[in-house]
Image (cartoon, grey):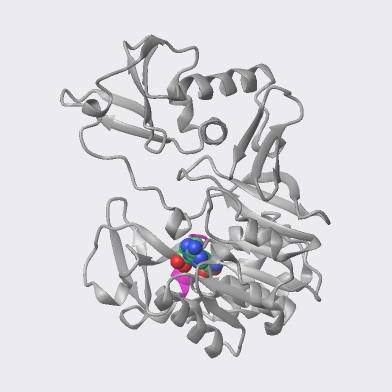
């Protein structure tokens, strides 16, 4: 029979060999915290189009440990309500809570540059597994964790208590932080945000760090690591690619319905300089979100089975619709903002600058704006005004 402690050691060794797990104190936490203790009542395994529910009670202990110590993200809730014990067969749904893959969780904790005295605010408790790792490193009193979903928070709290951890599990909207226990040395978010809420910066001590994933597409998002200054601003690099489920009240409602009807009246039509297919790649998708922050990239099929691409910005009532003859692309744009003109300008400047990776991007947050830029390409800068 598989021994949970040896599974934890195996996972720690794997994370060390991948270069993700570096700190001895974090290794001790990974070897001590039982991931399976945070998966009650079960998980949904990805089967492509559907999610297969698996609950511990119906699984052999060996199989359950194999799932718990896999390198995957384990989805624990679908559509903001369903748990694996509530369905008997595979279902369709959108993941709304999970135990993030251990490499991402551990990598983020390493990126926080923690000292044992640090007070941390975590946004997105989820299963409580990452909270438990933080508590193992810092002590339960130094960790505050906020979860927006009351049932998810209750399950995480019970799992933490069962693991002997009585930390501050708060049910609430993490976009507001948790002012009552501020100031924090570190704020870390395990859900993605369209922009870093200023509350996180206000609740962080000068010299502290805010770490969170920015962007609203399912790909093309980046991990911002911001140092908070004495003047109430925060600045730092996008340290790498990062993908998380979107914070709940910021989740984008997909553009649906008859897309060709929405794009009937175009103001302009021209050949593109760049193929819109590049938006399926990570860095171009990140740049597009900087250039037109409210826009969504939509791929659809028309009545004749032809593949169609669009950019829609519902707030700005603007669209770009792309057509190809197989050799080149034409874009038709409508509405007050020529979305593709803005995106294409950024893509061309980025290509001219040698196509730098996402970690070349810097972000500065003030109470009124988010400014992004790339040092090596002076024309690549974007300002998103909040007020
Ligand atoms: C990827 S899961 C968190 C993974 C977790 N850290 C773990 O290790 O199990 C993201 C969580 O963020 C929560 N969430 C989404 N929007 C939120 C918000 N506005 N405030 C707080 N939590 C939020 C979701 O309900 C979900 O449980």
Q: How many marks?
A: 0
Residue 331 in the magenta stretch? The answer is no
For residue 356, what is the image quadrant? top right
> Which residue is drawn at the image coordinates 42% and 52% (left, top)?
251
Q: Is residue 242 above or below residue 286?
A: below
Q: Residue 323 in the image: x percent, y percent?
A: 32, 17
In the image, residue 71 lies in the stretch drawn in magenta: yes
Q: Position of residue 179 (x, y in %)?
A: 64, 72
Q: Residue at x 61, y 77 (%)?
A: 132
Q: Is residue 335 above or below residue 184?
A: above
Say which quarter of the image contains residue 364. Answer: top right
Residue sitting nearer the eye, 6 or 181: 181
Q: Position of residue 99 (x, y in %)?
A: 49, 67
- Residue shown at 78%/72% (left/top)? 118
| Furthest residue toward front | 387
Say which quarter of the image contains residue 131. Answer: bottom right
Relative to 30, 221 lies left or right: left
State which region is magenta: 65-72
């Amino acid at each position: 029979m598989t021994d949970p402690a040896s599974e934890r050691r195996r996972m720690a060794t794997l994370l060390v060999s991948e270069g993700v797990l570096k700190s001895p104190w974090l290794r001790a936490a990974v070897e001590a915290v039982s991931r399976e203790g945070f998966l009650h009542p079960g998980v949904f395994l990805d089967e492509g189009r559907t999610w297969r529910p698996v609950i511990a009670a119906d699984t052999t202990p060996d199989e359950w440990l194999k799932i718990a110590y896999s390198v995957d993200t384990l989805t624990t809730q679908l559509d903001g309500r369903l748990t694996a014990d509530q369905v008997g067969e595979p279902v369709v749904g959108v993941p709304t809570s999970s135990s993030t893959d251990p490499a991402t969780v551990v990598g983020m904790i390493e990126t926080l540059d923690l000292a044992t005295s640090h007070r941390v605010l975590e946004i997105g408790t989820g299963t409580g597994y990452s909270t438990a790792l933080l508590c193992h490193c810092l002590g339960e009193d130094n960790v505050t964790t906020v979860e927006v979903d009351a049932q998810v928070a209750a399950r995480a709290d019970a799992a933490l208590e069962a693991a002997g951890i009585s930390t501050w599990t708060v049910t609430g909207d993490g976009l507001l932080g948790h002012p009552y226990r501020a100031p924090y040395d570190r704020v870390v978010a395990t859900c993605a945000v369209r922009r870093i809420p200023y509350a996180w910066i206000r609740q962080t001590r000068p010299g502290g760090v805010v770490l969170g994933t920015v962007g609203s597409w399912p790909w093309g998002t980046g991990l911002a690591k911001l140092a908070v200054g004495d003047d109430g601003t925060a600045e730092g690099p996008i340290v790498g690619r990062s993908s998380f489920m979107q914070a709940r009240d910021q989740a984008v409602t997909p553009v649906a319905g008859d897309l060709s009807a929405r794009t009937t009246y175009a103001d302009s039509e021209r050949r593109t300089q760049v193929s819109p297919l590049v938006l399926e790649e990570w860095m171009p998708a990140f740049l597009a979100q900087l250039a037109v922050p409210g826009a969504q990239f939509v791929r659809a099929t028309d009545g004749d089975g032809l593949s169609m691409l669009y950019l829609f910005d519902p707030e700005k009532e603007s669209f770009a619709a792309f057509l190809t003859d197989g050799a080149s692309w034409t874009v038709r744009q409508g509405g007050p903002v020529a979305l593709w003109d803005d995106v294409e300008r950024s893509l061309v400047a980025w290509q001219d600058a040698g196509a730098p990776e996402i970690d070349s991007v810097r972000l500065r947050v003030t109470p009124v704006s988010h400014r992004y830029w790339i040092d090596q390409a002076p024309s690549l800068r974007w300002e998103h005004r909040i007020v």
